[in-house]
Amino acid sequence: MSISGPRLAHTGLAGVAALAASALSPAKANAHDAPSGWSYPYECCSGKDCRHVKASQIRPGADGYLIRSSGEIVVYSDARVKHSPDGEFHWCSIGGRDDGRTICLFVPELMF
């Protein structure tokens, strides 16, 4: 049995509409994972912005956390400062650049 006429046209249009809707709907965005296995949140990372950094690269000071490579100071109360799930420093900067502006800074519990 074949489908023809208006029924075929309706089925075809419905399929095209469903395909178009799925193409236009936002896909679930995934950030990449930290070396210890937890996922960087999407608001911090677009897949290349975040990385583990040695504690020596982040210096707590009177005004906030100094990012040594960029010279930026992120104040302690800044919303970009986050708790680090693995107790290590992780820095998310624009484009993952060492001289980029901070998107998020994950700090160990004792320094949070």
Image (cartoon, rainbow, N blue to C red):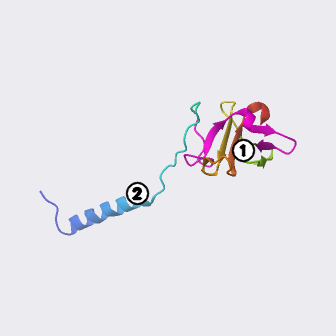
Q: Is residue 32 above or below residue 11?
A: above
Asked if residue 61 is among those painted magenta in the image, a careful observer would answer yes
Q: Which mark is residue 22?
A: 2
Q: Is residue 12 above or below residue 103?
A: below
Q: Which mark is residue 38?
A: none
Tell me where residue 61 appears, x and y as whole percent: 84, 40
Q: Which mark is residue 69?
A: 1
Q: Quadrant of the C terminus?
A: top right
Q: What residue type is labelled 1?
A: Ser
Q: What element carries label 1?
A: loop
**Which badge, 1 or 2, comes first in the chain's sequence?**
2
Indicate the quadrant where residue 81 lies: top right
Q: In this view, does 1 lie above or below 47?
A: below
Indicate the quadrant where residue 92 lies: top right
Residue visible at 81% across and 38% down in the picture: 60
Is residue 13 shown left or right of residue 93? left
Could you classify mark 1 by the number of other residues whose Cα lies within 10 Å: few (under 14), some (14-19), or many (20 or more)? few
Tell me where residue 80 appears, x and y as whole percent: 72, 47
Residue visible at 70% across and 43% down in the picture: 105
Query: Of circles 1 and 2, which is in front?
Result: 1
Q: What element carries label 2?
A: helix
Q: Nearer the viewer, residue 79 or 96?
A: 96
Residue visible at 35% across and 63% down in the picture: 17
Residue interval drawn in magenta: 38-67
Asked if residue 95 is among those painted magenta in the image, a careful observer would answer no
Tell me where residue 97 appears, x and y as whole percent: 63, 48
